Amino acid sequence: MILTPFSGSTRTDMKQIATHSNSASVAYFSMDVAIDSGIPTYSGGLGILAGDMLRSAADLGVPLVAVTLAHRKGYFDQRLDGQGNQSESPSKWSPESRLDLLEPRVTISIEDREVRVRAWQYGFRGIAGHGVPLLFLDTDMEENDPRDRVLTDHLYGGDDHYRLCQEVVLGFGGVAMLRALGHSSVHVFHMNEGHSALITLALLEEQSGSEAAHSISENEIETVRRQCVFTTHTPVPAGHDRFQTSLVHQVLGEARAATLSQMGVMNGELNMTELALRLSGFVNGVSMRHGEVSRNLFPGYDVGAITNGVHAAAWTSAPFCALYDRALPEWRRDNCYLRYAIGIPIAEIRQAHTQAKKDLLQQVKWLTGTQLDEKVFTLGFARRATSYKRADLLFTDLERLKAIARRVGPFQLVYAGKAHPRDEAGKAIIRRIFEAAAALANEVRVVYLENYDMALGKLICSGVDIWLNTPLRPQEASGTSGMKAALNGVPSLSVLDGWWIEGHIEGATGWSIGDGGGTENDSAAEALSLYEKLEQVILPLFYNQPDDYAKVMRAAIAMNGSFFNTQRMISQYIRNAYTCASGNGAQPLT
Ligand SMILES: *Cc1c(COP(=O)(O)O)cnc(C)c1O
């Protein structure tokens, strides 16, 4: 088994972190954070991004503390039957066995009840020893009402009422816990998506000294805005929480609801994105294109862009880590050195990739019983199964796919991805992939691996020959799995959306599906483009000019691995967002 642990830490580390941790200047809030496959408190890209951000913050010595919820029952474990029908079960874990319980308890109010909140700490330990603590808020305490004890159980589960209560725990509980821990020098509060937007209300109350309804002054709002940074992660409506006014009154109480009304963010409903936009001094999207799209979605707000990245060392397979350690020894400390991968002999690139591919195929065999062929061109597609990702676009024309395999050369496919338990369209996509797999059985092998998680993600991204991505434009705000692939010398074949618009150089770092022109998506035309690229360009290159294919692999590392990483991303947050928010010389945005 090759399921290497992600850079983590030990409990001893955490003790040390705890004693030095109350001098953080940035507090980072995220509803989900991905640490490793054993802590199932993430559902997809948002949590992965948060985890990678914290890993890189630790590497770079950024004085940062992060806050999330314990999610004792995790997201969910996925099982698939022979037809691709998904069933779900809780993905339980025990904070007790992985984290340290901190002493302070804080009290927040939900409806008319007092709810006690405690925190468990995980410590990210950076390459030079710097620690970044992550606090997991937990309401599962005896003194709480049974209704409140379960509030920190399910990630993205339950109804609107449950979700709003969770957001009260994250927002109000998070700020109160930081104060109880003595974090008095935090001057930037960074909201990773709108789920944590209630921190703005908590900070306003600190300004005014009470939660009693009173007239909030522009001055107080401005003071909070100077401290807040908001990153929006998706143009897809489901990514933006909205709550009925009546629910807001019930859960938050009259005084807080009045404050929200006064600020103009309760127009028939409370929109958490609106709240975060209104109270943040710096707002950004997660790729240059997503910045543009968000400016159109939120007219009147100044929205910048900082393109996402991934933690390079965490997502690079063991064979490539060994190669980089030899050829570019500084790459872990400074990812910029990956740029010089362009000078690594292609034989060594191919050798490392061959090992990564073997590791993947061995795991596929172990998980599914199917033996894929090492010599055969392998496409990978692993991501949340949801409509806009169009995981089944490749199967638009099965006869065409078979003909390509016969005429040009064989290929095989590795799929993975969970559908949200309430996303029926997403579940239907998984079933369609199973149907296509059955129809293609003798000519194109397709495996679908259950229970996509970080370990599987790393294995698939690094072991295939090409990374496929077929989102409906412009809904892939960034996408990060293609960045993981690039670090492992795996080029992308993707619709021009999100990060790929920036990382794509045709024939040099990978290939586009369609030309990215126009605003309308034409699935039939995109499927055609996908088939043509495969048939006329990619398969012939792979089978007839393997050295030239390996040059594309190498350029993907040098051009994209060196840039689309969280080291570069955090440096950009520091230069553009954190100085802005704190008013350190940068123009405050209006
Ligand atoms: C990287 C990763 C994601 C995000 O990938 P996208 O390309 O943004 O869809 C989601 N889930 C897991 C398990 C991952 O490793």
Image (spheres, rainbow, N blue to C red):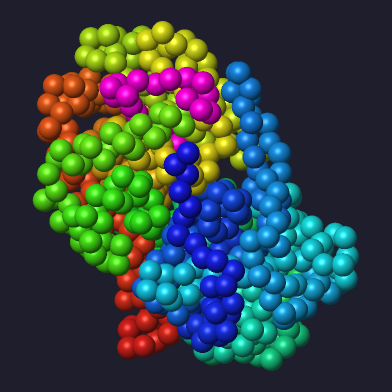
Q: Is residue 81 visible?
A: yes
- Tally the marks: 0
User: To which quarter of the image does residue 260 belong?
Assistant: bottom right
Taking the magenta stretch, the answer to whether it contains residue 374 is: yes
Residue 303, position as x, y percentages in the image: 39, 66
Taking the magenta stretch, the answer to whether it contains residue 257 is: no
Q: Residue at x 82, y 67 (%)?
A: 141
Query: Where 189 falls versus 320 (above or below)?
Result: below
Between 78 and 227, the residue placed more toward the observer is 78
Residue 446, position as x, y percentages in the image: 44, 20
Q: Is residue 218 visible?
A: no
Q: Residue at x 37, y 27 (%)?
A: 523
For residue 585, side relative to residue 178 (left or right): left
Residue 290, position as x, y percentages in the image: 37, 54
Q: Residue at x 72, y 76 (%)?
A: 256
Between 5 and 148, the residue placed more toward the observer is 5
User: To which quarter of the image does residue 374 belong?
Assistant: top left
**Range drawn in magenta:** 365-388
For residue 161, side relative to residue 543 (left or right): right
- The quarter of the picture where the C terminus appears is bottom left
Residue 515, position as x, y percentages in the image: 23, 36
Q: Residue at x 69, y 72 (%)?
A: 101
Between 101 and 115, the residue placed more toward the observer is 101
